[in-house]
Image (cartoon, coloured by chain):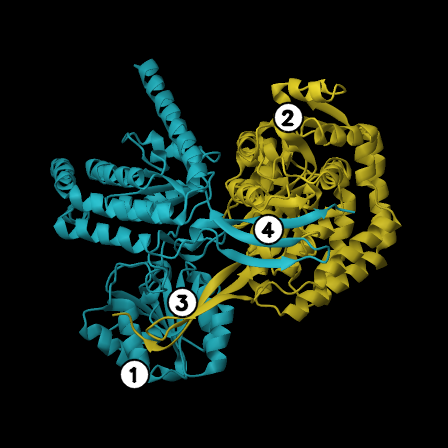
Chain colours: A yellow, B cyan
Amino acid sequence: MAAEQQNEEQDVAGLMHQIGRTARQAGQELALTSSEARTAALRATADELRKRRDAIKAANARDLEEGRDKGLSRAMMDRLTLDDDRIEGMAAGVETVADLNDPVGRELNAWEQPNGLRIARVAVPLGVIGVIYESRPNVTADAAALALKAGNACILRGGSESFHSSRAILTALENGMEAGGLPRGCVQMVPTRDRAAVGEMLKMSEHIDVIVPRGGRSLIERITRESHIPLFKHLEGICHTYVDSAADADKAVALVHNAKLRRTGICGATETLLVARSRKDDLLPAILDDLHAAGCEIRGTREVMQAWPGAHEATEADWDTEYLDAILSVKVVDGVDEAMAHIRRHSSSHTEAVVTEDAWTADRFLAGVDSAIVMHNASTQFADGGEFGMGAEIGISTGRMHARGPVGVDQLTIYKYVVRGSGQVRP
Amino acid sequence: MAAEQQNEEQDVAGLMHQIGRTARQAGQELALTSSEARTAALRATADELRKRRDAIKAANARDLEEGRDKGLSRAMMDRLTLDDDRIEGMAAGVETVADLNDPVGRELNAWEQPNGLRIARVAVPLGVIGVIYESRPNVTADAAALALKAGNACILRGGSESFHSSRAILTALENGMEAGGLPRGCVQMVPTRDRAAVGEMLKMSEHIDVIVPRGGRSLIERITRESHIPLFKHLEGICHTYVDSAADADKAVALVHNAKLRRTGICGATETLLVARSRKDDLLPAILDDLHAAGCEIRGTREVMQAWPGAHEATEADWDTEYLDAILSVKVVDGVDEAMAHIRRHSSSHTEAVVTEDAWTADRFLAGVDSAIVMHNASTQFADGGEFGMGAEIGISTGRMHARGPVGVDQLTIYKYVVRGSGQVRP
């Protein structure tokens, strides 16, 4: 029994390394393909998704049945479900990515040295991208499309709940790649639900250049702990909106309402409101009345409770909590510097906004807050690759290496130096 | 005894985390300092290095004495030695970095969305940089200056042989930072020679954003294996020069001579020469005659030995060997495609060059070879941040994340998104 288990473990390791080698080689071939071929392959993938709609729904039915047997929550079952609309949404999403400007081959900058050497930094694909995700099967198509558009091979590891659905979507991707003349190995999926496969992926730094973990906090914490490979990830989005003494009242009410309540479950939703003390008696109650009327729970400091008696008392833990719900923690601060100090202590470095009509305060906040995204007079809910004009995003990064904020196709490239000479030798 | 050892280990872990926390906080303060303050602090550091010359030499004498007792090799002792010239070189190097354009605050790009949001990507410091190096004490000043110029805190871990010298150089850095009004904690050195400290550093992903390992292969292999933090590193430089059928003979002889022999011990030195078959009887002997006359050993395939009988026979291992010596492996290939295939199999992805007068061949090579640096009609020995106009480099990266090729001050930054609105809410 022990020997058998050991064999199986070796098999998973061997399997993963085979997948890794195939991906690396396919990535090298893919890097040499034309922009037109990659676009065509993605358009063909969209067609395949539509053509294979019934097969995808049949595979999804198997996942749903298994999910029911396992007693998945209603929310999980909903995330897992693929209907005609969602399949069409996937296909349309792949087409959107297909039509983005090609990020590969861009000349990022170029200069000439005094000795006549002409040097250019030119964008090239990152290499091999690993994507580890949970229940939503559409991530299979979304993430692969972004990786492939930028000339990267990818290794997908979906949630075990969506195993059959993801395999059916993979077939569409593989057929699309083939139709475009791209190497079939440039998109692969881990063909086992064995959790050991994830552990192997996280060690394969010779085959995988970056891993994008998409899922809940516990998945991302595990990956962060174990990975020897760089990650594009955010653990959480504890976003702040600071309403300054020089805020316009109407803007402030509308911005906080949108930042908190437009969708409470996304990482760019504001979780903490900071308000300048000079506005605690006029503007703060107006903001909180509006939120309360829309069903939002308010947790504030004593000072907030005095200004607006409907508030519950906030505990220390509230400042470090991503509610992802209609709950807001609220604090009164002296001004922009105390707001920045609070943010430095409690922010998850995702997105923070200042509401003010004063240019000096806005500049101070934008320069002094070191989050991936800083905003002036805008809703933190704009923290999104699509809203930034990137077409789509594979995730949002709060790390500091390579990419910060929304990770779109441009961020899935790196560069090489191309040096053109006429026989120069180094003295 | 065991309990004592355990205590000591806990002390190293505690010590390292204290250093990490201090660095993170100092880095956050440093990110808010002005360009002028950072420049002034580095200029003051250069002055301090000159002023403290005698103290540095006295500390160096202690290291040299310990080195003699330990029986270090002559080469090691030479690398360890600091004399007046080398101290002046360090000071001048710090001044060069001080005077570089400020990489922080550059607007990398900017655009306006249809809803009026103005979005800019603005360069900000990476954060905290760890540098792990071996015997050369001057790395202390060089690496710290680059990190600090780009607004990063740094944690230095020098070789145990240069412990006293590095401490003396650190004092100059600390005094310089203080003179410029920068937080003293922005440059710290691990105050113990205990090797466990390196292991702790490699786990501190919450305090260190990137590690730059500088040293021999075994150090870098160990760090690669253990690190959970991204690295800027190259393991080796197996660089190739391909002499095409359309090569100019004079250029080819001069370029190969320089690429191999200018300095044989640097990572950009060419280790393998590939020559098109059509030139094996005219150009190949001319190139090898020239190298041989300069004392270079030639290891070639049978075909090379037939064309130039002075060659030794190359083994398979030669194609994967970084000689760092006056030895060259040589192979005849059909043309550019076979050259590229050989490079794909054996290159360390550092630097490769093509020598040809044919534009199509040059473009094919420059597009098809996926190394950090690709060159046309230039010596691979130009693979250097200084030669690229970057002022200086903290290292050369053959990894694919964040930075490839020479890592200068620009590459020691990342960006944040600055979004300016006028009250926009997301629909």
Identify the mark at residue A331; answer none if there is no mark. Answer: 2
Viewer can see residue B77:
yes
Residue labelled with disc 1:
B250
Whether A39 is drawn above or below A211: the answer is below
The Cα–Cα distance between marks 3 and 4, rounded to whole angstroms, is 25 Å
Q: How many labels were placed on the picture?
A: 4
The Cα–Cα distance between marks 2 and 3, rounded to whole angstroms, is 58 Å
Residues at marks 2 and 4 on the same chain: yes
Q: Are marks 2 and 3 in contact (CB under 8 Å)?
A: no
Residue B30 lies, in percent from the top left, at 41, 40
Determine the image quadrant of residue A146.
bottom right
Whether B323 is drawn above or below A155: the answer is below
The Cα–Cα distance between marks 2 and 4, rounded to whole angstroms, is 41 Å
B152 or B80: nearer the eye?
Answer: B152
Residue labelled with disc 3:
B352
Determine the image quadrant of residue A40.
bottom right
Q: Type of residue at label 2?
A: Lys
Whether B412 is drawn above or below B319: the answer is above
B265 or A374: nearer the eye?
Answer: A374
Helix, strand or loop status at disc 3: strand
Viewer can see residue A22:
no
How busy is the neighbourhood of tag 4: few (under 14 within 10 Å), some, or many (20 plus)? Answer: many
Query: Which chain hosts label 3?
Result: B
Residue A272 lies, in percent from the top left, at 66, 30
Q: Type of residue at label 4?
A: Ile
Query: Counting residues from the N terminus, which is met first, the one under dot 3 or under dot 1?
Result: 1
